[in-house]
Amino acid sequence: MFRFRSKKTWWIAASAIAACCGSSAASAATSQYAMHEAIQEGTQLFASSALGTNGMSCMTCHRAGGRTEGRLPNGKRIPSLVGTAATFPHYNQRLGRVVTLDMQLEHCIQGGLGGKPLAYDSPKMVALLSYLTSLSQGKPIHLQGLGNPQAAANPAK
């Protein structure tokens, strides 16, 4: 993907595309740019200790940007985050309810990083979710219980 040196340069290019090719091409360029920016911001937040109060970042546990197996501070191994977004929402046995990726992210920010909750539509939450979802690009969606409708209908059996 081509990277623009500034937002001003990007807007000039988008305006030229709109004038030349119509608004649908400009709209596609705008959405691609917006997603790229959100993912980049999420990547930076993931590595930053700014989300919490204890000096830790998401990468304290989720190493290599979540692309490899990680470890909790107690030494417990945790899986890579690659493909994780494609498994949400899912049932959390410990909580006894279905949780979304947003909810899991909030749990990590508050519990692991000692941070304050983010509004679900805040720029930081959108950026983090965009980054985490980008790690699942091309992965099949796998929601619990949907592979076996009989098991979902009769969970006690």
Image (cartoon, rainbow, N blue to C red):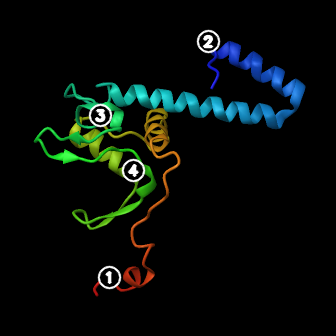
> Going 41% across and 59% down the picture, which residue do you hit?
89
Dot 1 or dot 3, earlier in sequence = 3
Which quarter of the figure is the N terminus placed in?
top right
Give the secondary structure at mark 3: helix
Measured Cα–Cα span from mark 1 to mark 3: 34 Å
- Residue position for label 4: 84
For residue 5, the mark is 2
- Identify the residue at horizontal 23%, vertical 47% (top origin): 78
- Mark 1 against mark 4, which lies toward the viewer? 4
Tag 3: amino acid = Cys
Q: Which residue is mark 3?
A: 58
Query: Label 1, on which residue?
Result: 155
Relative image position of residue 52 (x, y in whole percent): 27, 30
Residue in view at x 27 percent, y 35 percent: 115
Q: Earlier in the sequence, mark 4 or mark 2?
A: 2
Instruction: Give the spatial CA distance, label 4 vs label 3.
Output: 15 Å
Residue 4 picture location, percent across and down: 64, 16
The first of marks 3 and 2 along the sequence is 2
**Where in the figure is residue 28, as x and y percent of width and height?**
73, 36
Q: Name the N-terminal-most of marks 4 and 3.
A: 3
Identify which amino acid the numbered label 2 is placed on: Arg
**CA–CA distance between discs 4 and 2?**
32 Å
Q: Residues within 10 Å of mark 1 (few under 14, many from 20)?
A: few
How many neighbours does mark 4 have within 10 angstroms: few (below 14), some (14-19), or many (20 or more)? many
Disc 2 element: loop
- Mark 4 lies on a secondary structure that is helix
Looking at the rendered image, the disc whose residue lies closer to the viewer, 4 or 3, is 4
Q: Residue furthest left?
A: 74
Question: Within the image, what quadrant is residue 13 found in?
Answer: top right
Judging from the image, what secondary structure is the residue with disc 1 in?
loop
Cα separation between marks 3 and 2:
28 Å
